[in-house]
Image: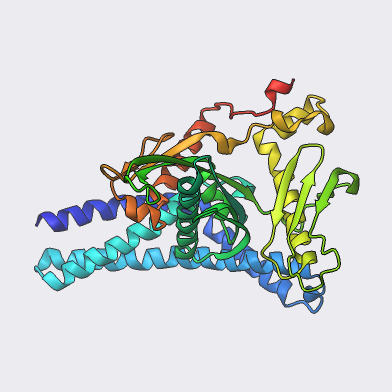
Amino acid sequence: MLELLNIKIEVERLSNILTKAEGCLDLPELSARIEELNQLISQATFWDNSASFYQILQEIDFLKATKKQYQRSHFILEDIKAAIELLELSADEELLLEAQTNLTQLQQELETIEIQQLLSNPHDQKGVFLTITAGVGGADAQYWAYMLLRMYFKWAESHSYKILLVEESCGDLAGIKSASLEIIGRYAYGYLKSEIGTHQLEQISPFDVINSLHTSLASVEVISILGESVECEIPEKDLEITWPRYRGNVNRTETWVKMVHIPTGISVFCNQQRSLMQNKEKALAILKSKLFAMPTAGYAYALAQGVQIDKIQRRQIKPLSNKLIREYILHPYTNVKDLRTNVETLAATEVLNGKIDLFIKAYLQQLNHTTSVGKEPLDNFKSLL
């Protein structure tokens, strides 16, 4: 039976992937670490340090989830193998359908494991601040920025991440001028770093009475959330902070805060918290994360070569989000193509509903290959030296 033969071939492939992944993970070491953390939690003084116990609880939850994921994959794999043995003895349509269903589930499980194997950078496991900014083009670009915001919200929901709206600036007619999401959960940055860049949409404009074809641009910036264990203090003299001036009108409820890092010109705007102080704290957290993230774009290289922070001018910082990375075509046909990996799909509606994992995986595979052959990454600050 051809269907059964195809299942056997696929099971062999998936079994090899699982074995390879387990070899990289070292399950005995993982189990030992879980036991070590459990003993730490049982100590009476464990709960005294809130920053410490939060990080440890996060780690143990992740380790347990990882172990459970591998155990679940093994259980499904053994179920399929048992079904294959029975099907080789006697045809059974119901059992064949069950084996195919289990195979699909195993493929999804190992797809996640395969992607996680590509995330070896310590920052990959962190949450992210994701900012979307509409390009020029008025209402069309602003509506496109909103579509991207919805796409990432849907993606984060499907991966069970916690999502917080940090800032939103509404468009003139529709959509948004800009918005920032805080996406909290393991590997959020590792996945979403693939989205840094400019995204281009081609569609019939919903705001044009003659139904002409419009091209719209929006940029996506992704930075990892700075952990509490990392010390990163910003001198007060380097900060310019702006907030609402009430001028005696106590009934106004604006609580927004704008914070600018003077040496680099990096700015942060936060308006979604309930109080001015909460927005100030959130803006500072984002600013610290942005500054700490700069080394991956060449900041550390510049400092190592003796370029002082106050010598780096805003115009000399070339955001990675300026590079066009993906095209979304909705008319006269549908297609989404990643310009870095050449991966494309006709299922544009599914992509805009958050199904972007195919692009994420292809980018990570390409990035992993580039790193392994020793290709030097783009450095935004070498022009300063």
Q: Position of residue 160 (x, y in %)?
A: 50, 66
Residue beneath the point at 41% across and 68% down: 72
Q: Position of residue 15 (x, y in %)?
A: 34, 54
Q: Relative to 44, does residue 274 appear above or below in the rendering? A: above
Q: Is residue 208 left or right of residue 227?
A: left
From this viewpoint, which residue is outermost toward the front?
A: 209
Q: Position of residue 68 (x, y in %)?
A: 48, 68
| Residue 23 can be seen in this image | no
Q: Position of residue 224 (x, y in %)?
A: 64, 50
Quarter of the rendering occupied by the C terminus: top right
Q: How is the image coloured?
A: rainbow
Q: Is residue 117 left or right of residue 7?
A: right
Residue beneath the point at 29% across and 44% down: 331
**Which image quarter: residue 353?**
bottom left
**Which image quarter: residue 43?**
bottom right
Q: Is residue 160 left or right of residue 250?
A: left
Observer-nearest of 224 and 182: 182
Observer-nearest of 35 and 76: 76
Q: Relative to 265, does residue 18 appear above or below in the rendering? A: below
Quarter of the rendering occupied by the N terminus: bottom left
Observer-nearest of 109 and 259: 259
Residue beneath the point at 32% across and 46% down: 330
| Residue 357 can be seen in this image | yes
How many marks are shown on the rendered structure? 0
